[in-house]
Amino acid sequence: MKKILLGAMLCLSLPTTALAARDDLDEIRDSGLNKNEWRMSRHDKMRGIKVFVKNEEGKNIRSFRVEATFNSPIEDLARVQADVESYTKWYFAVLDAKLLKKVSDKEFIFYMVHDAPVGMPDRDVVLRAVIEPMTKNRPYVQIRMSALPDFMPPKPPLVRMEAENYTVKWTPIGKDKTLLESEGYVDPGGTSPTWAINYVQGKGPYANMMGMSRMLDLPKYKDKEQKEPNPYKFFE
């Protein structure tokens, strides 16, 4: 998915694409939007995905929240999340992903390169993942992701992201059924048009849910015979 925003930014010869990009820009410019209030930006009823955005007070960049229901057990989601090298197959606009350090069975640090909009340098980010396992008193798994911009030296021409901070919560809601809830905020660092950042934050969460759904159908994560032991402790 090279240069994901090329259509939204430049293909004015395609009226529907240009209109979609204009609509996204109008959302950000709309002075009538309430600050600190979540607004649904997409509801895919067939796939059970809801995406929300919020204009934070004092910030030009929006926060995001996504809810999705998967017809898979929570253990399968944990296996997909633990397989960092597979992020290029499902995580929105990721060109490279690799594990840097396994700190413990509840914490790991990984690296990703994001495909940036055309005319802008690609971004890289170092993220720390901290797992809060599911217990008897906490009937869900929660993962806290936070950027570590100074963990390793910059790698020009890539621009190091200042933040890709979000939480992911998985809650079993039935036999082989899991509710995923995620909320966060992205600061790509460097110089980036606000509308482009917000466009990515609006489209990325939905694309990630679609991608994870595809991964959960793969035998590697689905079939008991092919499942490998998870290197991290998502369950007490």
Image: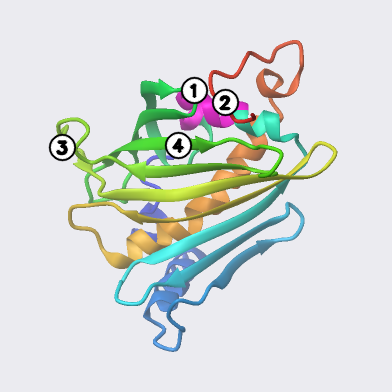
CB atoms of marks 2 and 1 within 8 Å: yes
Q: Which residue is mark 3?
A: 157
CB atoms of marks 3 and 2 within 8 Å: no
CB atoms of marks 2 and 4 within 8 Å: no
Q: Which residue is mark 2?
A: 233
Q: Is residue 125 magenta?
A: no
Taking the spot 43% from the left edge, 80% from the top edge, the residue there is 35
Q: How far apart are the two marked residues, 4 and 3, measured between alpha carbons?
A: 29 Å
Q: Amino acid at mark 2?
A: Lys
Q: How far apart are the two marked residues, 2 and 1, measured between alpha carbons?
A: 5 Å
Q: Which residue is mark 1?
A: 105
> For this rendering, which residue is in front, 159 or 110?
110
Q: Is residue 165 left or right of residue 227?
A: left
Tell me the quadrant of the picture where the C terminus can be found.
top right
The residue segment tinted magenta is 79-88
Whether residue 185 is visible here, answered yes or no, is yes
Q: What secondary structure is found at the residue carrying circle 3? A: loop
Q: Which residue is mark 4?
A: 130
> For this rendering, which residue is in front, 119 or 139?
139
- Residue 73 percent coordinates (x, y): 75, 34
Tell me the quadrant of the picture where the N terminus can be found.
top left
Give the answer, above or below, for where 70 lies relative to 236.
Answer: below
Q: What secondary structure is found at the residue carrying circle 2? A: loop
Q: How far apart are the two marked residues, 2 and 4, measured between alpha carbons?
A: 10 Å
Taking the spot 38% from the left edge, 54% from the top edge, the residue there is 5
CB atoms of marks 4 and 1 within 8 Å: no
> For this rendering, which residue is in front, 207 or 170?
170
